[in-house]
């Protein structure tokens, strides 16, 4: 656990030694606000909630989260520092968890940066702050799931660009899994059980429930399982091809 | 103690390291020699636990690297090829990070960093980002992280690659200073390096040990090591050749096509240079040019492998 903390601290600090962190946070804040006010019609709806804000998160994360996760392992591979890291007396899990948690905390920090929206909505009306808190937690969990996917795919390649594109694509499929676009494709020739499974894999279905302010245990378990699964896959990838 | 037994690594159908076995005790400096792709780095990667061997075993101070990886890794300091680091960090922050991962806590962290900064002379650049440093300094940062926990075993993959002659000398001196109680393995292309620091040298080719000897033994096999080529203003090559042959330090003397003579040392590891300079002084001869040669690894290889090198 100590090693995880040491790795986490180093990784987290490294975000802020380059412009990446500041650019990311700025873009996240600008885009999430723009979506909320223009596309989400925050004022026009006349309702004191943050639904228009949270509704856009899956789409925002589709390209923002891969930009955070793409460097996690690709950069280590490209610079060769992976060899240094993995010959230190730490376990593979220490390294994976330290890196993942640093990235997850970083996106959490960006998310917290949107608090003026929460202040606004409280100034304008009397929102259900419990529901808003639940939505924040849900959004953070969704970011975690995306990051775990990105962590695994970044471990596959030296190229950050490839990692970015792969992560965006896989996350898009996970988001779309619950949409008619995907479900109609499978309908009719796939057993109903599998169809339910595909729909059940959808990130959006689980996030929608949360964004409405209901933090159900099943949704939390879903996101936790996603994170666990993809981090385990990361470990397998690293074991299989750490030297390439 | 390092025990390597029947170490083998295959990538697909290619065997990169083929049935390597050796043992090393404290106070020994082993030099791995070999051309690129000979399996030097792959062997080091398996010893340090970065790569899993296809078969065979590595024991570090009694710990099996595959079953007790962390305990074995804690005993070693490792400089990977190219001295990778986290370049966006400052030297101080990077060394502190390594110290913490290596188990230092509290005041000990600063102590370790201070000690190693002095050992490899990094004081002046401690607060610079690693990416802004020259190649020589980056290499020293790599050495510093390998040395920070004062390990009993040091594995250094091409520690002097890309350094200027002064820096090379410094690094070699450092390795010599450290080597009293430690086990050191270095890999290199440079024959001179082996004679300067190693107590044992191993030539690896196509993943196999083709030669395992002392540096002196290796140099003897390298024809032309320390030979001198020379031309004197106003003195004919024939006359020069005769004068050289008369010196006890000089062995065979050959005429070079296009002018000048090539003088081989009389015995392996003998150096004819001083005697030649003496002779030139005594005769008031001015050299048009003079050059000393080192034994070439390529030649050594051809000798060691009976010309079967690809």
Image: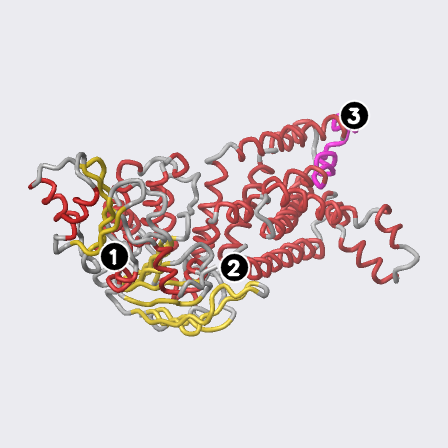
Q: Which mark is residue B195?
A: 1
The residue beneath circle 3 is: A44
From the viewer's perspective, tell me whether residue B3 is left or right of residue A20.
Answer: left
Q: CA–CA distance between discs 3 and 2?
A: 48 Å
Find disc 2 in the rendering and name its residue: A93
Q: Is residue B218 left or right of residue B265?
A: right
Is A201 placed above or below A108 here?
below
In the image, farthest residue toward the left: B282
Task: Check disc 1: other Cα within 10 Å, few if <14, some if 14-19, many if 20+.
Answer: some
Query: Looking at the image, which residue is at 45% across and 52% down?
Result: A5
Q: Is residue B35 visible?
A: yes
Q: Position of residue B135 (x, y in %)?
A: 37, 40
> x%, y% of residue A62?
69, 41
- Check if mark 3 and mark 2 are on a common chain: yes
Q: Residue at x 46, y 50 (%)?
A: A7
Residue A48 forms part of the magenta stretch: yes
Quadrant for residue A224, please give it.
bottom right
Nearest-to-viewer mark from 1 and 3: 1
Mark pair 1, 2: CA separation: 42 Å
Q: Nearer the viewer, residue B156 or B68?
A: B156
Which span of residues is magenta-colored?
A41-58
Q: For the view shown, which residue lies furthest in the right direction?
A: A188
Element assignment for label 3? loop
Pointers 1 and 3 within a single chain: no
Residue A155 placement (x, y as % from top left)? 58, 52
Chain ID at mark 1:
B
Q: Quadrant of the N terminus of chain B?
A: bottom left
Check whether the beta carbons of the residues at disc 1 and disc 2 lie within 8 A of each other.
Answer: no
């Amino acid at each position: 656990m100590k090693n995880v903390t040491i790795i986490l601290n180093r990784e987290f600090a490294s975000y802020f030694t380059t412009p990446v962190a500041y650019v990311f946070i700025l873009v996240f804040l600008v885009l999430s606000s723009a979506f909320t006010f223009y596309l989400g019609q925050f004022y026009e709806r006349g309702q004191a909630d943050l639904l228009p804000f949270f509704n856009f998160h899956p789409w925002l994360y589709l390209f923002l989260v891969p930009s955070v996760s793409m460097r996690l392992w690709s950069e280590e591979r490209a610079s060769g520092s992976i060899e240094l890291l993995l010959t230190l007396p730490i376990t593979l899990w220490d390294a994976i968890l330290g890196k993942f948690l640093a990235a997850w905390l970083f996106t959490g920090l960006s998310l917290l940066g949107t608090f003026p929206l929460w202040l606004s909505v409280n100034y304008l009306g009397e929102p259900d702050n419990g529901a808003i808190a639940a939505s924040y937690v849900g959004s953070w969990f969704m970011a975690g799931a995306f990051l775990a996917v990105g962590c695994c795919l970044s471990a596959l390649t030296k190229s950050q660009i490839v990692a970015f594109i792969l992560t965006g694509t896989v996350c898009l499929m996970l988001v779309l899994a619950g949409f008619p676009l995907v479900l109609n494709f499978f309908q009719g020739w796939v057993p109903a059980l599998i169809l339910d499974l595909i729909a059940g894999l959808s990130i959006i279905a689980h996030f929608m429930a949360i964004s409405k302010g209901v933090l159900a245990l099943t949704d939390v378990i879903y996101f936790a399982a996603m994170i666990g699964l993809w981090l385990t896959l990361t470990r397998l990838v690293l074991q299989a091809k750490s030297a390439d | 103690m390092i025990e390597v037994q029947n170490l083998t690594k295959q990538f697909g159908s290619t065997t990169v390291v083929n049935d390597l076995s050796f043992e090393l005790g404290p106070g020994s400096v082993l030099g791995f020699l070999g051309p690129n792709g000979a399996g030097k780095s792959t062997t080091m990667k398996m010893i340090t636990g970065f790569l899993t061997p296809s078969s065979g075993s590595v024991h570090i101070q009694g710990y099996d690297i595959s079953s007790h990886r962390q305990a074995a890794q804690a005993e070693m300091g490792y400089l990977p090829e190219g001295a990778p680091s986290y370049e966006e960090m400052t030297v101080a922050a990077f060394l502190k990070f390594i110290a913490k991962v290596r188990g230092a806590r509290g005041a000990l962290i600063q102590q370790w960093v201070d000690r190693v900064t002095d050992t490899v002379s990094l004081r002046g650049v401690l607060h610079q980002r690693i990416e802004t440093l020259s190649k020589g300094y980056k290499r020293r940062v790599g050495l510093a992280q390998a040395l920070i926990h004062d390990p009993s075993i040091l594995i250094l993959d091409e520690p002097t690659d890309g350094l200027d002659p002064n820096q090379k000398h410094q690094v070699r001196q450092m390795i010599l200073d450290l080597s009293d109680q430690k086990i050191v393995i270095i890999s290199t292309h440079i024959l001179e390096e082996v004679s300067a620091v190693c107590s044992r040298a191993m030539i690896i080719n196509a993943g196999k040990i083709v030669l395992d000897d002392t540096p002196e033994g290796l140099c003897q096999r390298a024809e032309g090591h320390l030979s001198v080529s020379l031309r004197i203003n106003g003195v004919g090559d024939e006359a020069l050749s005769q004068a050289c042959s008369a010196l006890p330090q000089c062995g065979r003397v050959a005429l070079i096509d296009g002018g000048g003579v090539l003088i081989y040392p009389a015995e392996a590891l003998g150096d004819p240079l001083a005697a030649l300079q003496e002779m030139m002084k005594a005769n008031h001869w001015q050299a048009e040019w003079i050059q000393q040669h080192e034994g070439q690894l390529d030649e050594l290889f051809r000798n060691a492998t009976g010309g079967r090198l690809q």
